[in-house]
Amino acid sequence: MSQMAELRSLVQRDTICIMAEQTKIMLSRLREIGWSLWDPIGLKGVGDGEWQDGGKCADEYDGYLLQVVGRLRRGERTAEVVAYLEKTETGHIGLNPNATTHSRAEATVAAIANYLSTLPEGPLKVRNGSRLCKNSDAA
């Protein structure tokens, strides 16, 4: 085996090992936080458990919650992440601000930060139950 081929083999093997050791973040835990503390649309109160994992609405807030994870893991200030959720609710989703907008966003960010503090530093993979879903940009 040539020196170059051996080097490529080592790099590939090391890359696979590093990828295999990435921390798994549970999407179900993020959903639990988002649905219990944030839920700006109020879908939890509508329907028969459609917001729970496996339900039609379960993934409604996934993108926003994963953005919170990424922002916190990159070291963005908590106030900026709270502002992101507020802007998401009042801008992107299009709801009017109300008396609970800030406190719900703040509680959601605090709970996600608390969850992340239990995980090792480094890149994250997102797990939905027992199957791998997608990469998080939280590195």
Image (cartoon, grey):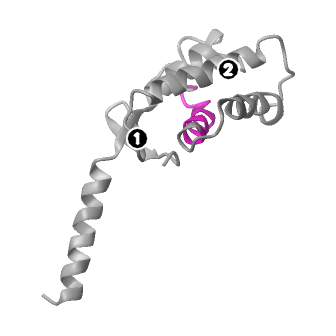
Query: What is the magenta range?
Result: 57-71
Quarter of the image for the N terminus: give it: bottom left
Q: In the drawing, does residue 119 fall left or right of residue 69?
A: left
Position of residue 94 relative to residue 12, above or below, is above
Rounded to the nearest whole Å, what is the CA distance between mark 1 and mark 2?
23 Å
User: Considering the numbered disc 1 on the image, is that residue within a helix, a strand or a loop?
Assistant: loop
**Residue 42 image-quadrant placement:** top right
Asked whether the viewer can see residue 51, the reply is no
For image coordinates 63% across by 40% down, the residue present is 76
Viewer-nearest residue: 37 or 57: 37
Q: In the drawing, does residue 64 fall left or right of residue 120?
A: right
Q: Residue furthest right?
A: 96
- Which three-letter amino acid code belongs to the residue tagged 2? Glu
Viewer-nearest residue: 109 or 36: 109
Asked whether the viewer can see residue 27, the reply is yes
Q: Main secondary structure of the magenta part?
A: helix
- Where residue 54 sits: x, y (%)? 45, 25
Count numbered badges in the picture. Answer: 2
For image coordinates 53% across by 49% down, the residue present is 137
- Where residue 105 sits: x, y (%)? 69, 22
Position of residue 120 relative to residue 89, above or below, is below
- Where residue 78 sits: x, y (%)? 65, 30
Label 1 environment density (alpha carbons within 10 Å; few <14, some 14–19, many ≥20): few
Viewer-nearest residue: 79 or 85: 79
Q: List the residue tagged with mark 2.
A: 106
- Which three-letter amino acid code belongs to the residue tagged 1? Glu
Q: Earlier in the sequence, mark 1 or mark 2?
A: 2
**Residue 8 image-quadrant placement:** bottom left
For image coordinates 36% across by 38% down, the residue present is 24
- Where residue 106 sits: x, y (%)? 67, 20
Numbered label attached to residue 39: none
Q: List the residue tagged with mark 1.
A: 121
